[in-house]
C-alpha cells in the first residue's frame, strides 16, 4: 500500500497550535473572522494563508506574515507537540509489512522535519514533502498528482489521509483513495468527511484493518 499522510491534525496533535498562531495574527491586527476561517486556512499552509490574509486587509507583506507564523509556532513544533494516539506504533507496523509511507503537508520544513525527528518517525517515510516543495497548496488537485508521480505510482494507488474536509475533497478529485481522520478541530465536519471519503478513522490503529 502507498500511503500519503497529512501532518497537522493527522500525524501530530498540532491543530491547537496552528489555529492559535493563525488567529493570533488576525487578532493582533483587529481583523474580524467567523468560525469558517479554520476550515478555509488549514489546507493552505503558511504561504497560502498569508496570501489569503492579504485579502482580509492585513498590511504586512506575505513574506512578513510567513516569518511571523514561523516565529510564533516554532518552539511548540520543535519541543512540545505530541504524536496523535497510536500513530507511532501504527507507522512502525505499516513500515514492517512493506508499505510506502509518505508525508504531504502545508507546514514548512522548518517545523515539519524537527518535529518528526523528535518523535523518532522521520526515517520511516520514503518522502517528507511540504507544499512549498511543489509551489502550490493542497487546495490544488495537481499537487496530489505530482506527489503520486514522484512516488512512482498512479493516484489511484495512493491512500491519502487528512483531517481536513477540503483537502480530502481535493484529493478525491485528483483520483486518490481517501481516508478521513478524526481531529477535535474538524469534529463538526465528521459526517461530511465520511460522506465523501472511502474510509474514516477515529484512531490510527484502525488503519491496520483497512
Image: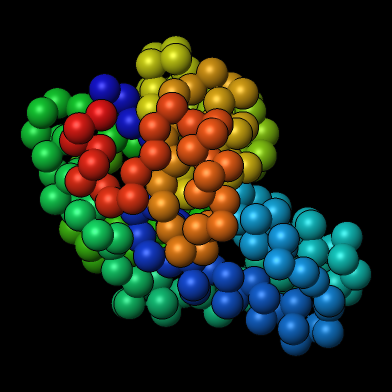
Which picture quadrant has residue 59? bottom right
Quarter of the image with the N terminus in it: top left
| Placement of 18 over or under 132, stated as above or below | below
Q: Residue at x 84, y 78 (%)?
A: 31
Indicate the position of residue 26 as horizontal and vertical percent values: 75, 77
Furthest residue toward front: 191
Q: Residue at x 62, y 42 (%)?
A: 166
| Placement of 66 over or under 201, stated as above or below | below
Quarter of the image with the C terminus in it: top left
Confirm whether residue 135 shows in the render.
no
Q: Residue at x 54, y 18 (%)?
A: 175
**Is 59 or 52 nearer to us in this picture?**
52
| Placement of 30 over or under 141, stated as above or below | below
| Placement of 155 over or under 85, stated as above or below | above
**Is 170 or 101 nearer to us in this picture?**
170
Q: Residue at x 87, y 66 (%)?
A: 56
Indicate the position of residue 103 as horizontal and vertical percent values: 39, 41
**Is 154 or 65 nearer to us in this picture?**
154
Left/right placement of residue 90 relative to residue 129 reads: left
Indicate the position of residue 76 as horizontal and vertical percent values: 41, 77
Left/right placement of residue 117 relative to residue 105 reads: left
Q: For the image shown, how many numbered marks are present on the structure?
A: 0
Confirm whether residue 81 shows in the render.
yes
Left/right placement of residue 147 relative to residue 36 reads: left
How is the rendered protein coloured?
A: rainbow
Indicate the position of residue 123 as horizontal and vertical percent values: 21, 46
Left/right placement of residue 122 relative to residue 194 reads: left
Amino acid at each position: 500500500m502507498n500511503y500519503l499522510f497529512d501532518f497537522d491534525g493527522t500525524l501530530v496533535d498540532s491543530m491547537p497550535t496552528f489555529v492559535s498562531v493563525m488567529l493570533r495574527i488576525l487578532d493582533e491586527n483587529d481583523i474580524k473572522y467567523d468560525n469558517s476561517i479554520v476550515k478555509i486556512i488549514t489546507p493552505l499552509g503558511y504561504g497560502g494563508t498569508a496570501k489569503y490574509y492579504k485579502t482580509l486587509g492585513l498590511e504586512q507583506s506575505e513574506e512578513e506574515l510567513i516569518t511571523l507564523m514561523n516565529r510564533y509556532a516554532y518552539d511548540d513544533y520543535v519541543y512540545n507537540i505530541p504524536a496523535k494516539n497510536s500513530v507511532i506504533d501504527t507507522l512502525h507496523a505499516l513500515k514492517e509489512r512493506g508499505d510506502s509511507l509518505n508525508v504531504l503537508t502545508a507546514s514548512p520544513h522548518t517545523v515539519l522535519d524537527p518535529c518528526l525527528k523528535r518523535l523518532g518517525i522521520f526515517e520511516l517515510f520514503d518522502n517528507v514533502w511540504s507544499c512549498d516543495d511543489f509551489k502550490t497548496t493542497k487546495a490544488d488537485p495537481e499537487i496530489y498528482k505530482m506527489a503520486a508521480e514522484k512516488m512512482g505510482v498512479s493516484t489511484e494507488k495512493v491512500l491519502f489521509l487528512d483531517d481536513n474536509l477540503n483537502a480530502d475533497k481535493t484529493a478525491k478529485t485528483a483520483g486518490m483513495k481517501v481516508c478521513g481522520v478524526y481531529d477535535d478541530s474538524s469534529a463538526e465536519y465528521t459526517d461530511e468527511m465520511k460522506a465523501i471519503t472511502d474510509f474514516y478513522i477515529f484512531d490510527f490503529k484502525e488503519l491496520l484493518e483497512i
